[in-house]
Image (cartoon, helix red, strand yellow):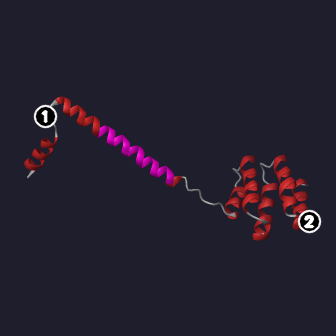
Amino acid sequence: MIEKVSDFIISLLPSNSIVFIIYLAVIVIISIFLIFFLSKLKKNKQNTKKELTIDDLLEIANSPKSNTKDLVFALEYFLSKFSIKDNEEKSFELFNKILNHKNRSKILFDIFHGKILPANLEYKNKLNNIEKRALNK
């Protein structure tokens, strides 16, 4: 049985050395093509981006490791994808956490006062109170 398998494998190999080199080159080219093809498939699966929720933004705001860039992203993402009307409690909690974060900076207040406040004038008093408390901290 083993002899038949080994004879079969040997019969697949070419007998001429030049043909053998061509045979190996073809196998290498096919292998490289398969590697690139499979990596493209995997990359396309990884590129499907998950939509963030307001809870994900709260995680960013709650994390002591978040830097100013992360906090700016959270504010900008909230502004582009959410509205306070969707979930008032979590929205105000998010603003409070971001504006009182240990890594806060002036740019956060600029975005809050320049973009978020004008877009949500019906909540102006509540937003102003959050901003005042953060500034007085």
> Within the image, what quadrant is residue 19 found in?
top left
> Within the image, what quadrant is residue 7 found in?
top left
Identify the residue position indicated by label 2 in the image. 125
Task: Examine the rendered structure and indicate whether residue 93 appears above or below residue 137.
Answer: below
The Cα atoms of the two marked residues, 2 and 1, are separated by: 87 Å
Secondary structure found at label 2:
helix
Q: Does the residue at mark 2 contact the one at mark 1 (Cβ under 8 Å)?
A: no
Q: Give the extent of the magenta segment.
A: 27-44
Q: Residue at x 16, y 39 (%)?
A: 13
Return the x and y of residue 133 as percentages of the image width and height: 89, 59
Q: Nearer the viewer, residue 21 or 65?
A: 21
> Which is the main secondary structure of the residues drawn in magenta?
helix
Name the quadrant of the C terminus: bottom right
Q: Amino acid at mark 2?
A: Asn
Identify the residue position indicated by label 1 in the image. 15
Earlier-in-chain disc, 2 versus 1: 1
Circle on res. 88 = none
Q: Nearer the viewer, residue 40 or 131?
A: 40
- Count residues near mark 2 (Cα–Cα under 10 Å), then give few for <14, some for 14-19, many for 20+: few
Return the x and y of residue 136 as percentages of the image width and height: 91, 54
Task: Examine the rendered structure and indicate whether residue 29 appears above or below residue 52.
Answer: above
- Count residues near mark 1 (Cα–Cα under 10 Å), then give few for <14, some for 14-19, many for 20+: few
Q: Amino acid at mark 1?
A: Ser
